[in-house]
Amino acid sequence: MRRTQLARTFLVEKDIYFLDEPTLGQDPVGRVKVWNLIKELAKRRVTIFLATNDMYEAETLCSRICFINKGKIITISSPERLKALSGTIKVEIDCINTFNRLDLSNVQGLLNYEFDKKTIKVELSNSGEAIVDLLSKIKEYGIKVEDIRIKRTRLEDVFMRLIR
């Protein structure tokens, strides 16, 4: 049913399309086909308004994103600019040795953190100094680092930060 509706939408070539959650209920193959069609239309300079609550889909397909909450526009910008606005990074650190005590409250740029015996998860302001300060503090506790993963900001994180 969904595929038929989409096919009808694209039967007539237009300069502008309004699509409301076009991949909702699609299997992975159908979703990729719809995405490829949207990308092809965008290459031909066709304007597409895409309503979706799938932030990954929005980031993949859209050059500009409008966040709406309770019927009001919060912001409009490119996905890259929106993620830069959040100003935060998430860091996950796997440790070689176990530890029971860790106080990172005075780390520069710290927004929040949690840890268990071998893993530390931290959200920091997006600055090199914050990471250096974090690693220095971890070293003070005698914790040996095995692996560090810096997770990029997701659009969901930005949206949640903006509506708070």
Image (cartoon, grey):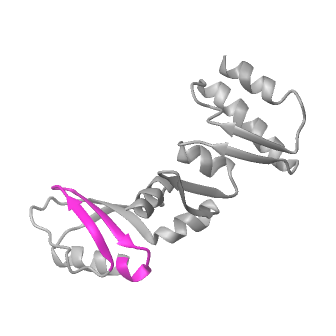
Residue drawn at (20%, 59%), measured in percent from left and top?
Answer: 115
Residue drawn at (66%, 21%), measured in percent from left and top?
Answer: 2
Q: Which of 107 and 19 is in front in this view?
A: 19
Residue found at the far front of this picture: 71
Residue drawn at (59%, 23%), measured in percent from left and top?
Answer: 27
Q: Is residue 115 left or right of residue 163?
A: left
Residue 6 lies in what quarter of the image?
Answer: top right
Residue 26 in the image: x percent, y percent? 60, 25
Q: In this view, does 74 lie to the left or right of 42?
A: left
Q: Nearer the viewer, residue 115 or 123?
A: 123
Quadrant in the picture for the N terminus: top right
Start-end of magenta stretch? 109-130
Residue 107 in the image: x percent, y percent? 26, 79
Quadrant in the picture for the C terminus: bottom left
Residue 70 versus residue 34 in the image, above or below? below
Residue 88 versus residue 95 in the image, above or below? below
Tell me if residue 21 is in the magenta stretch.
no
The answer to whether residue 151 is visible is no
Tell me if residue 125 is in the magenta stretch.
yes
Residue 70 in the image: x percent, y percent? 47, 51
Q: Nearer the viewer, residue 136 or 36?
A: 36
Q: In this view, does 146 lie to the left or right of 115?
A: right
Residue 45 versus residue 13 in the image, above or below? below
